[in-house]
């Protein structure tokens, strides 16, 4: 009897390892069905191959499958997955640059806001519940149509659009717009300017200082580049003049 039980167990393993030789339908407990060309079970998962030569598959928990049936309908061709390489994901700087251009804002300003808000941590959550890179409150995110504040692109899009709206609201007064971004527009209007809160004032000063530092560095770099270009052109001009002033030795040679 023990030998027979071992044999039955071995046959059972062999059955699960043999792929379906023709199109079958997996009937799930939830009522859904999946047509497949082959299948194999590994552990607690059954892999259903959707096309010939294992082109495309889906993994289903074995205990979710009620039964298998033969498919009597004509097979539907399965598209072969494209072998083209997936597009390279954008870096955060590229995301910020693209979204800033869309809303006509300086990307350095958005970088400075992100630096002050989250320190570039896309999973940041404040004690008040603000989320993501630009620390969107759930209500603000909902109003902006942002469903996932932890998605960097969506968060930067929402935060940049909100800041752009605030700038327009305050006639492009950056100080008021930043104060409203931090404390809310109602506080800016209540105090007719930056509210007398240490946190808000420090926040505005930090962003303005960081933004100005970037611009000063850019101007210095541009000045150095311009000077190098000017020196190179002067050197090239001097070399040209020197070459033109050399005597024509060939014309002075005795005949």
Image: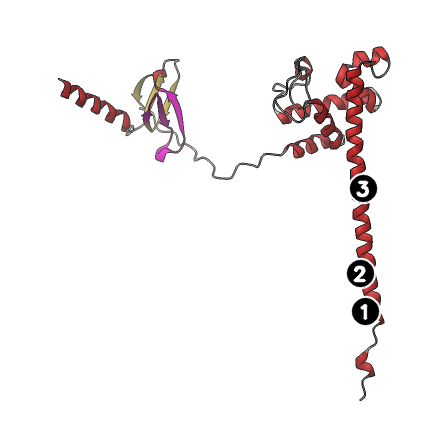
Q: Residue at x 30, y 20 (%)?
A: 69
In terms of depth relative to the viewer, which is nearer, 26 or 198?
A: 198
In space, the residues marked 2 and 1 are separated at their CA atoms by 11 Å
Say few, some or many: other residues with alpha carbon within 10 Å of mark 3 (under 14 / 14 to 19 / 20 or more): few
Q: Is residue 69 left or right of residue 177?
A: left
Residue farthest to the bottom, as pictured: 255
Residue farthest to the left, as pictured: 1
Q: Earlier in the sequence, mark 1 or mark 3?
A: 3
Q: Earlier in the sequence, mark 2 or mark 3?
A: 3
The C terminus: image quadrant: bottom right
Residue 100 lies, in percent from the top left, at: 72, 30
Q: Residue at x 78, y 17 (%)?
A: 200
Question: Residue 193's image quarter?
Answer: top right
Q: Which residues are magenta?
A: 40-61
Q: Is residue 222 magenta?
A: no
Q: Earlier in the sequence, mark 2 or mark 1?
A: 2
Circle 2 SS class: helix
Circle 3 SS class: helix
* Mark sitting on residue 236: 2
Say few, some or many: other residues with alpha carbon within 10 Å of mark 1 (under 14 / 14 to 19 / 20 or more): few
Residue 108 lies, in percent from the top left, at: 74, 32
* Res 178 seen here: no
Which tag is nearer the camera, tag 1 or tag 3?
A: 3
Residue beneath label 3, please?
220
Residue 165 lies, in percent from the top left, at: 77, 21
Residue beneath label 1, please?
243
Q: Is residue 255 left or right of residue 132?
A: right
């Amino acid at each position: 009897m023990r030998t027979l039980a071992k044999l039955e167990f071995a046959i059972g393993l062999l059955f699960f390892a043999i792929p379906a030789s023709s199109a079958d339908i997996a009937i799930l407990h939830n009522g859904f069905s999946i047509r497949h060309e082959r299948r194999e079970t590994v552990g607690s998962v059954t892999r259903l191959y959707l096309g010939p030569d294992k082109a495309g598959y889906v993994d289903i928990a074995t205990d979710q499958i009620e039964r298998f049936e033969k498919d009597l309908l004509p097979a539907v061709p399965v598209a072969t997955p494209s072998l083209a390489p997936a597009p390279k994901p954008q870096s955060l700087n590229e995301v910020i640059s693209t979204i800033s251009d869309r809303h006509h804002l300086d990307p350095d300003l958005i970088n400075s806001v992100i630096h002050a808000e989250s320190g570039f941590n896309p999973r940041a959550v404040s004690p008040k519940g603000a989320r993501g890179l630009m620390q969107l409150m759930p209500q603000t995110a909902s109003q902006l149509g942002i469903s996932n504040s932890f998605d960097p692109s969506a968060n930067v899009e929402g935060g940049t659009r909100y800041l752009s709206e605030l700038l327009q609201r305050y006639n492009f007064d950056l100080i008021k717009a930043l104060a409203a971004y931090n404390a809310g527009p109602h506080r800016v209007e209540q105090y007719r300017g930056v509210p007398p809160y240490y946190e808000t004032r420090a926040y505005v000063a930090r962003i303005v200082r960081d933004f100005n530092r970037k611009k000063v560095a850019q101007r210095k770099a541009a000045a150095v580049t311009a000077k190098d270009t000017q020196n190179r052109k002067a050197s090239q001009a001097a070399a040209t003049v020197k070459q033109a002033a050399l005597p024509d030795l060939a014309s002075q040679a005795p005949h």
